[in-house]
Structure formats: C-alpha cells, structure tokens
Image: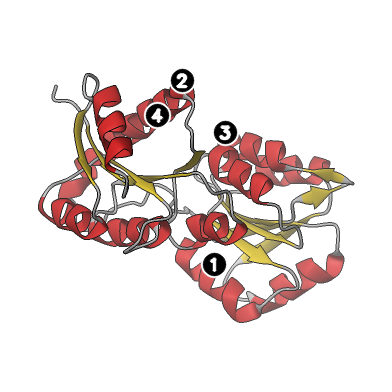
Amino acid sequence: MSKPKVLFIDDEERIVRSLTMQFRASYKVKGVTDPTEALKLISNDHYHVVVSDQRMPNMQGTELLKQVRNISPLSLGILLTGYADLPAVIGAINEGEIFRYLTKPWDTDEINRVLEKATNIALQMEPFKTLETIPAANQIIGPHIMVVDEDPAIHEAIASQFEGKYIVHWAPNLDTVFNILNTNDIALAITDLMLEGEEITPILATLKQYNPNILTIVLTKLKDSNIIINLINQAQVFRYLPKPIHPALLNKSVIAAT
C-alpha cells in the first residue's frame, strides 16, 4: 500500500523544510511556500491531507483551505498558525471546514496524532473519489434537528424558521439531550456553549463520538478563541454563529449542512 500524500504550505521556507523532513518517513510529502502553487498541485493530484499556515502574504490559510475543499472535497485540511486570533479561528470553522487547528510551535506528539488520524480518515474516504455523488465526511442523514439551549425563545425561533422543512426537538438540559438522541435520528444539533451554568465543549466532543454523523452548529454569545479552537479539535463543529440569531445566516448554515 502506498503512503498517504500530505501537502504542507507555509510562507517560511524553514517551516516547510522542517515539516517535510519530520514526516517524509511516514507519508509521501510535498512542501511549498506559495498558496497558488499549492492549488495547482491539488488540481493535478490528490492529497489526502493539506496542512496550511494561516497568515501568509498572498492568501490566508482559511481561504486556501476553502479553495482546497472546492477542488478536492475528500482532502482534509489542518490549519497551523502561531496566532490564535478570533476571526481566524471562526473563519477556520465557517470558511474552510477545518479538520484540526494546531498552534505554533507545534507539539511533535500532537501533530503526529492529528496527521495519523486525518490520513486514516482520508484513506477510508478514498473509494468515493470515483462516485458521481460524494458523501461528505460531515453529511447529515435525516431531517431531525436538536436545539440545545435553555432559552425557549431560541427553540421557538428556530422551530418557526424551519417549520415544514425539519422536525425540531428542544433540549434545555443534558438529560433531555441524551433522551432525544436515544429516541430520534438526529442529523444536526444547534447548540449554545453554556448549559446549566457550564461550558459544554467536552459534551459536544462526546456527542461527536456518540454519533459521528451528527453535525453541530454553535450558536452563542461567547467569543473566546481558545474555546473555539477546542470546538474544532475536540467537537469538530460545522459552523460557529453569534447570538442574537441572524435568520439568513442560520438558514445558510443549515442548508450547507444538509
């Protein structure tokens, strides 16, 4: 079996050289400093995983990985950066559909684990390359939505917006969350980050493990880049939206999920 292909993009030559040297024994690696060159490579060859820096002169990493996703839907994107700024992190979710977000300087064991997991998933998806309809890694499988929020007005607003299109369930607490999951085929969870006075990122990670097919849209007032990084790396959230609800933005995100 041939090695998985991994492409590294960073505007610093020494970073590219370091990454390619570190992983050339395990993967078939290629490293470039120009995002435009990276897109040309991806257009002509399939890379299982694409690892990109965020802050580059000619193109942001989130924009690059978004274009990678359009060209090669089965390639998984990893964002690698030294800047944990909020717009970049939110963009990583909402623009590039990033598999993982890693910070510089990277931890060798962590990046090894992440690359191994990403390439394993990409290899499992590889047979779908020849199909006309590709089942995306995060594709939902049914019309049921679960709203996880203590505020009944949030549930009522979402239920009203999607009436006739989806069956919307309301989970105001964790007990109800798992009761609904046990009795319904939930495709999409729209959730706040705070429930019963606690930040629930670990619960969202558990939810993803419980049912990997569920997509999660976070709808919250919280604006903490570290929390959002955890959402990418642990819970693999699909979108991150601010409160109060913007119906058009929510509608766009739900359509993208379905």
The structure residue drawn at horizontal position 21% and vertical position 24%, both measured from the top left corner, is: 24
Left or right placement of residue 64 versus residue 100 in this view: left
Residues at discs 1 and 2 in contact (Cβ within 8 Å): no
Q: Residues within 10 Å of mark 3 (few under 14, many from 20)?
A: few
Q: Which residue lies under the disc numbered 1?
A: 254
Disc 3 to disc 4, C-alpha distance:
14 Å
Q: Which residue lies under the disc numbered 3?
A: 209
**Residue farthest to the bottom?**
248
Q: Which residue lies under the disc numbered 2?
A: 109
Front: mark 1 or 2:
2
Q: Earlier in the sequence, mark 1 or mark 2?
A: 2
Disc 1 to disc 2, C-alpha distance:
35 Å
Q: Which amino acid type corresponds to the residue marked 1 in the rendered image?
A: Val
Disc 2 to disc 3, C-alpha distance:
22 Å
Disc 4 to disc 2, C-alpha distance:
12 Å
Left or right placement of residue 185 versus residue 198 in this view: left
Disc 4 to disc 1, C-alpha distance:
27 Å
Residue 191 can be seen in this image: yes
SS category of the residue bearing label 4: helix
Classify 173 as above or below 146.
above
Classify 49 as above or below 257.
above
Residue 228, how many percent across, how many down?
63, 49
Tell which of 169 and 104 is nearer to you.
Answer: 104
Q: Which residue lies under the disc numbered 4?
A: 117
Q: Which amino acid type corresponds to the residue marked 3 in the rendered image?
A: Gln
